[in-house]
Image (spheres, rainbow, N blue to C red):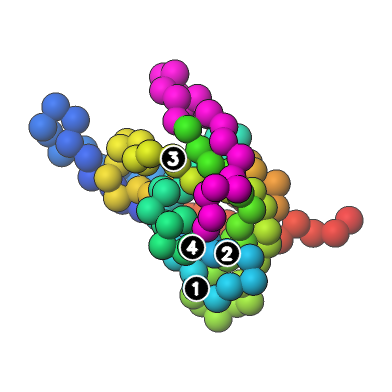
């Protein structure tokens, strides 16, 4: 499956700047449930864990009383508390191919999602993405994702 890089505008020092970033939508849902939310997230090969905005977990009905709490440290040393639980991921390019569906851990933010870009509601990292699928970056054309091939 191929996903286009997103052309993103931000405003450092009140001047517009456009960049291509590997932002895609990946579906998140409770295991065994149909309701799926498609957060927009950065495909980040340097992130250890997939983190998603807490509001999405609340909307999907995750029970955070049973979630394991952990802190992650981001670039620049910022610490974010996350609530770890298991979720089902759905990758679909909407081009008629069979979606890739798998289960893995996910970290929902305990508080507000880091505001690096207000449109972004997820960071897709090793746990939650890269240990489940093969990802290739062809900057700035596309991000290619496929199931791991059995060798």
CA gap between label 1 and label 2 equals 8 Å
Whether residue 97 is visible? yes
Q: Position of residue 82 (x, y in %)?
A: 50, 38
Q: Residue furthest top?
A: 77
Q: Position of residue 6 (x, y in %)?
A: 36, 53
CA gap between label 1 and label 4 equals 10 Å
In terms of sequence position, does the residue under pointer 3 or pointer 1 come before the other?
Answer: 1
Are the two marked residues, 1 and 4, in contact with CB atoms closer than 8 angstroms?
yes
- Residue drawn at x 68%, y 58% is 103
Residue under numbered circle 2 = 30
For this rendering, which residue is in front, 83 or 27? 83
Marker disc for residue 110 = 3
Q: Residues within 10 Å of mark 2 (few under 14, many from 20)?
A: some
Q: Nearer the viewer, mark 1 or mark 4?
A: 4
Q: Is residue 89 above or below residue 97?
A: above
Are the two marked residues, 1 and 2, in contact with CB atoms closer than 8 angstroms?
yes
Q: Residues within 10 Å of mark 4 (few under 14, many from 20)?
A: few
Marker disc for residue 35 = 1
Q: State which region is magenta.
A: 62-80
Q: Nearer the viewer, mark 4 or mark 2?
A: 4
Label 3's element?
A: loop
Corner quadrant of residue 33: bottom right
Marker disc for residue 60 = none
The question of residue 97 being in magenta is answered with no
């Amino acid at each position: 499956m191929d996903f286009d890089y997103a052309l993103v505008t931000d405003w450092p020092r009140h001047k517009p700047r456009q960049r291509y970033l590997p932002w895609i939508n990946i579906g998140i849902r409770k295991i065994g449930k149909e309701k799926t939310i498609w957060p927009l997230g950065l495909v980040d090969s340097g992130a250890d864990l997939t983190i998603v905005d807490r509001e999405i977990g609340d909307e999907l009905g995750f029970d955070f009383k049973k979630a394991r709490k952990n802190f992650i440290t981001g670039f620049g040393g910022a610490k974010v508390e996350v609530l770890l639980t298991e979720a089902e991921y759905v990758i679909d390019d909407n081009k008629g191919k069979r979606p890739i569906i798998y289960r893995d851990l996910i970290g929902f933010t305990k508080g507000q999602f880091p505001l690096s870009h207000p449109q972004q509601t997820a960071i897709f990292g090793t746990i939650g993405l890269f240990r489940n699928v093969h990802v290739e970056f062809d900057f700035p054309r596309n991000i290619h994702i496929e199931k791991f091939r059995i060798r």
